[in-house]
Image: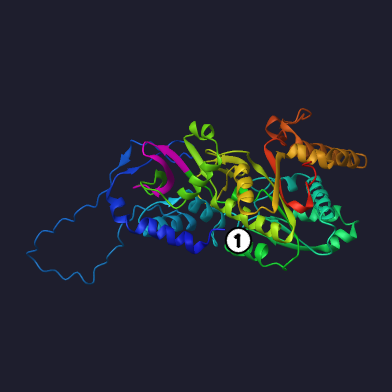
């Protein structure tokens, strides 16, 4: 996992030596739209004006008791604390910040980050996750976890780690569904890694400093999509990292880095894993160093002590181009609009996860990805929904059918008779599932 000190050091190195030159040189820029390309031939000149010499005074006047108003500022007075913080980072650094740095501040700033001081889940929040859709999701994850535990030889102690548990709904449903299997539930040592200002430290403690020689099962549902991504755009001089700067009218904008950045090393690494034809037609590429490093931490742990990891998220089994998005109150908004008020997420590169795991440990095997619909269907969600429908009210039945469709369906539910804008949208094919396990345990269900 990237060390914060390394990030800070590399950032200082990147900007300190050339900051003064950058301020007076040409910068490539674009509008604030997240999906628009930063033109390679459009620049903004920035220069520092020379103050004029005041005219000579012929009369001496004592002005010591007069009121001196504060210097006029072009900064808007209604900036949020997070916006001020971001602008101060850019100002004192003397140049733009990476999209990944912006994303990390927006989501996990200790005082104003999106995840820090609010409940963002459910209908009253900004988005809905699968555990909030239906209890059946957590129950099926419980089935997978218990099956892997049995393949591991039913150890008497096991670490069960959930990355990004949110309200804890998934684990609550998992434990309730498995409550009759006492040998399994009594073997569990629960560890919940919630998003916080000390996210890296918590991940290290839970993945590296747990009881030694105890196998670990890790659940990462909609966790990887919130890890900060670096965006690169193809320009006339090659691949350039997209950065975020402040315009003269104090709004945020995208610019291109004039020189290679530390994240370029991860771009090169990702491109080595891809076929030439996969990259040839792309103008944008996203890479997630923290996802690569975290996967390797997980793989090392699983390879050493046994266990496995289940990763479920929306993404692609290949290079991700330009997927970063912002969602506020269940609607898409501009990425740079009112930072901290919307969730930022990006597609997960499952191919990069596979390569990262296999690169670091020969003692693990990677399985999938398969669609969430295939994954849940193979674990028995169809039988579970039928059993629940046999003993429920009409209102509960409608909720069950709606939740089931959202988990395994594709597109709008065909049975929906309500308002079009409220029609359930299936996530069954958008979300993918992948497993990383110790190779001694064989192939996990349902990836056979």
Q: Is residue 107 above or below residue 32?
A: below
Magenta span: helix, strand or loop, mainly?
strand
| Coordinates of residue 47 in the picture (x, y in percent) | 25, 49
- Work out which residue is located at the far left of the displayed protein and give it: 58
Asked whether the viewer can see residue 337, the reply is no
Q: Residue at x 27, y 65 (%)?
A: 68
Q: Residues within 10 Å of mark 1 (few under 14, many from 20)?
A: some
Where residue 96 appears, x then y in whole percent? 40, 51
Residue at (40, 39) in percent of width and height: 238
* Left or right, 63 with reference to 113: left
Foreground residue, 369 or 89? 369
x%, y% of residue 198?
Answer: 58, 64
Residue 99 in view in this figure: yes
Q: Is residue 318 left or right of residue 261?
A: right
The residues colored magenta run 232-248
Give the residue at mark 1.
196
Q: Quarter of the image containing the N terminus?
A: bottom right
Residue at image coords 14%, 69%: 61
In the image, is 383 to the left or to the right of 269?
Answer: right
């Amino acid at each position: 996992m990237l060390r914060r000190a390394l990030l800070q050091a590399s950032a200082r190195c990147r900007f300190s030596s050339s900051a003064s030159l950058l301020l007076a040189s040409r910068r490539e820029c674009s509008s604030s739209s997240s999906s628009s390309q930063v033109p390679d031939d459009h620049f903004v000149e920035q220069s520092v004006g020379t103050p004029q010499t005041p005219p000579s005074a012929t009369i001496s006047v004592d002005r010591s008791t007069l009121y001196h108003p504060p210097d006029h500022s072009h900064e808007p007075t209604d900036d949020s604390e997070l916006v001020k913080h971001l602008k101060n980072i850019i100002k004192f650094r003397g140049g733009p910040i990476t999209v990944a740095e912006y994303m990390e501040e927006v989501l996990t700033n200790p005082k104003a980050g999106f995840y820090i001081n609010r409940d963002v889940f459910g209908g009253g929040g900004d988005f809905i996750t699968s555990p909030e859709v239906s209890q059946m999701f957590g129950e099926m994850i419980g089935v997978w976890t218990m099956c892997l535990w049995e393949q591991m030889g039913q150890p008497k102690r096991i670490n069960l780690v959930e990355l990004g548990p949110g309200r804890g709904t998934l684990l609550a449903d998992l434990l309730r569904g498995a409550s009759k299997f006492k040998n399994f539930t009594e073997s569990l040592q629960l560890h919940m890694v919630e998003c916080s200002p000390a996210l890296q430290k918590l991940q290290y403690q839970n993945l590296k400093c747990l009881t030694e020689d105890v196998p670990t099962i890790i659940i990462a549902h909609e966790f990887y999509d919130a890890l900060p991504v670096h965006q690169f755009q193809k320009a006339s001089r090659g691949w350039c990292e997209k950065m975020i700067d402040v315009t003269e009218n104090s709004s945020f904008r995208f610019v291109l880095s004039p020189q290679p950045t530390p994240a370029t090393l991860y771009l090169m690494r990702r491109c080595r894993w891809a076929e030439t034809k996969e990259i040839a037609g792309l103008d944008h590429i996203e890479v997630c160093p923290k996802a690569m490093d975290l996967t390797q931490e997980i793989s090392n742990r699983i390879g050493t002590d046994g266990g496995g990891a289940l990763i479920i998220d929306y993404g692609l089994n290949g290079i991700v181009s330009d997927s970063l998005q912002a969602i506020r109150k269940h609607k898409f908004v501009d990425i740079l609009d009112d930072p901290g008020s919307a969730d930022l997420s990006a597609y997960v590169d499952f191919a990069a996860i596979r390569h990262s795991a296999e690169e670091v440990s020969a003692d693990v095997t990677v399985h999938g990805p398969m669609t969430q619909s295939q994954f849940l269907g193979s674990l028995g969600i169809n039988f579970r929904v039928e059993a629940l429908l046999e003993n429920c009210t009409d209102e509960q039945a409608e909720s069950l059918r709606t939740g089931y469709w959202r988990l395994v369906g594709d597109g709008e539910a065909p049975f929906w008779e309500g308002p079009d804008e409220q029609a359930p949208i299936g996530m069954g094919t958008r979300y993918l599932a992948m497993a990383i396990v110790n190779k001694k345990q064989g192939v996990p269900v349902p990836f056979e």
